[in-house]
Image (cartoon, rainbow, N blue to C red):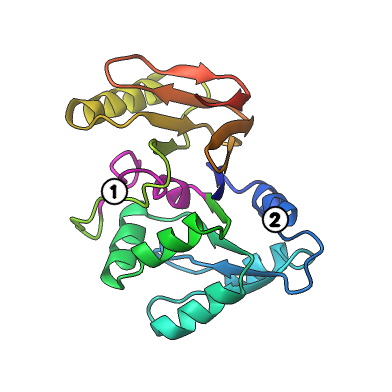
Amino acid sequence: MQLHLFSTPGEPLLHDVVQACRTIVGAHRARVVAYLPAAAMGPLWMDYTVEAFRDVAGVRLIDLDQMEHDDIDAVLDQALALYIPGGNTYRLAQRLRQRGFVENVKRRIQSGLPLIAFSAGTVFCGQDVLTTGDINVCATTEFSGLALTRFNFHVHYPAVQGPERQARDVRLKEYHAMRPHSVLALQDGAYLRVMGERMEVLAGRCWRFDLGQAGHALDAGPIA
């Protein structure tokens, strides 16, 4: 299993996401990335995404509203990586559940399809999505994530100590009052990579919150 998880995609033009993709596709001739913007609440940013990946891979859209399951499978069969961007995490969970697509995605990732994700896409990789900072605007009751690691994820964690970080810490403490999963909170610019059983911080700052403990910053390197 190969995961490339970000809080933000990097600038300009999705720089960090594209660089992760470059390491995956290498010199492969059929370089295709499956693009799944299911968390979007507005534009899909297709033209922007195609331009960002222009020198690395072709982008094939997975449109859950328009495509049949066989067509989606055909895109995934061709793809060298799956890319899930940001948006509203609850919307992402709702749409994938409604289409019966969660187990398909999870099975493919666990079988070797690399995943690149940021923001909502990263949060959805956790045991559940209740550590998102998004509002449940779609009133979904489907809160489980892909459960690709033992952790939950939180994104856009403030880099500076102050009221905003204190508010996030309180929310994560409230989460642990009801659920036991350890949480990795990514500051913008952070990059987590999972290769098989090995998870590591490659760039930026990540914080770990365990049940009954205050959060602490992780150094670059493996996460035990």
| Observer able to see residue 8 | yes
| Closest to the observer, 29 or 15 | 29
Residue type (three-letter) at the residue carrying disc 1 = Ile
Q: Which residue is mark 2?
A: 24
Say which quarter of the image contains residue 96. Answer: bottom left
Say which quarter of the image contains residue 58. Answer: bottom right
Mark 1 and mark 2 residues within 8 Å of each other at the beta carbon? no
Q: Residue at x 63, y 24 (%)?
A: 220
Q: Nearer the viewer, mark 1 or mark 2?
A: 2
The span picked out in magenta is: 118-136
| Closest to the observer, 130 or 168 | 130
The disc, 1 or 2, on the residue closer to the chain's N-terminal end is 2
Q: Residue at x 49, y 66 (%)?
A: 36
Which numbered dot is residue 135? 1
| Closest to the observer, 111 or 223 | 111
| Closest to the observer, 161 or 75 | 75
Q: Residue at x 40, y 81 (%)?
A: 69
Can you give x and y, in whole percent of width and height, for residue 64 in the image? 40, 75
Q: Secondary structure at mark 1?
A: loop
Q: Residue at x 30, y 32 (%)?
A: 181
Say which quarter of the image contains residue 25. Answer: bottom right
Q: Is residue 3 left or right of residue 72?
A: right
Is 7 located above or below residue 176 in the figure? below
Residue 52 in the magenta stretch? The answer is no
Can you give x and y, in whole percent of width and height, for residue 7 in the image? 53, 41
Prevailing secondary structure of the magenta residues: loop
Disc 1/disc 2 C-alpha distance (Å): 33 Å
